[in-house]
Amino acid sequence: MFSNLIRTPITQLRHNENSNQFFIKRDDLLPFSFGGNKVRIAEEYFKDMLQKDCNCIISYGSSKSNLNRVIANMSRAEGIPCYVISPEDINPETQATFNSILVKDTGANIISCSRDNIADTVESVINQCMNDGLTPYYINGDKYGKGNKEVPVRAYIKAYDEILEYEKNAGIEFDYIFHASGTGMTQAGLICGKMISGNNKKIIGISIARNYEIGAKAIEDSIYSYFKESTLQDVDSDITFIDRYVCGGYGKYNNCIISTIQSVFNTEGIALDTTYTGKAFWGMTEYIKENGIYNKNILFIHTGGSPLFFDDLLNERLLID
């Protein structure tokens, strides 16, 4: 669809910590709907939807989310009906964001529901689509959100292959790969890519909200779903999910994150945000200091979310000077 054959650039940063060399993979530059990891993930959902002969897509989550922005935009581009079931949009006074404005402007059907009525709402929307003569595809599997975990994993297995290709061409090997880890889809894909290739890179997900127990379990489930093997050994030993830098939860941040975003923008010209990438970049630098990591090649994956950067500016969470 949109990111086929695209290799997002990897460039070296000026950033310096403990004499390490820092590089960044710019998935925020994927050329569709402001880019980001959700472009790769949404593309896998759409491929799976078409393979299953479905002709409309049902997503889940806040209309403010990066994933729903991309899915709604991709649906409009492909002429496919889109439904976004959103438990966070039930309050009409909730402040609009650039993502939610974009989702609405694509013409996606936004279905609000309470958090204790999600499964029934999913079932109702599926039935409505079928009554309208459509064959719906729900990205999360069944109405309870079980199933389909292997689909988004494919996105970052492919991205991992891109990283290996870059290493071969540039004559460099990365010792660590850091990224923002939310639902775990990106991290699961990277770990599967590592397992397939058989190398020893340390993949470190900086949690943006979840605690270790919940976050690591989600990643593990996705890995098992992809390989479809219950005999995989020591999967948990490959999962490094750091929950020390969540700052109290999703969307929460501190002054250190603000300073990190300002510094990266002013020295690198790269936009991060307080919810995902800025928190992860700050968490990465803290982890490196706390664990005494020196003289290594470190890759940070910029997982995107450019509209969130502008939300931060508009709401005066950032002051770039």
Image (cartoon, rainbow, N blue to C red):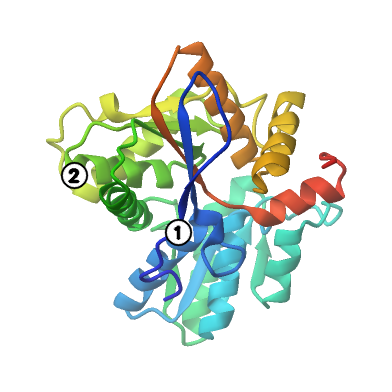
Left or right side of 5 for 39:
right
Amino acid bearing label 1? Thr
Q: In the visual, does 59 lie left or right of 306?
A: left
Q: Please rate how many residues cluster around mark 2, counting C-alpha atoms within 10 Å: few if below 14, some from 14 to 19, many from 20.
A: few
Amino acid marked by disc 2: Ser
Q: Earlier in the sequence, mark 2 or mark 1?
A: 1
Image quadrant where residue 49 sits: bottom left
Q: Which mark is residue 8?
A: 1
Classify the position of the N terminus by image quarter: bottom left
Residue at the (59%, 23%) spot, across then down: 245
Q: Callout 1: helix, strand or loop?
A: loop
Point out which mark residue 197 bears.
2
Which residue occupies the extreme left position in the image? 231
Callout 2: SS: helix
Q: Is residue 10 left or right of residue 268?
A: left
- Asked if 25 appears above or below 297 in the picture, the reply is below
Kindly check if marks 2 and 1 are in contact, taking CB atoms under 8 A apart as contact: no
The x and y percentages for residue 267 are 68, 40
Disc 1: CA contacts within 10 A as few (<14), some (14-19) or many (>=20): some
Q: CA distance from mark 2 to mark 1?
A: 20 Å
Q: Position of residue 20 (x, y in %)?
A: 46, 25
Task: Kindly indicate the quadrant of the structure image that contains residue 235.
Answer: top left
Of the 4 image quadrants, the one containing the C terminus is top right
Give percent across and percent down for residue 93: 87, 53
Residue 60 shows in this picture:
no
Whole-percent x, y for residue 11 in the image: 48, 48
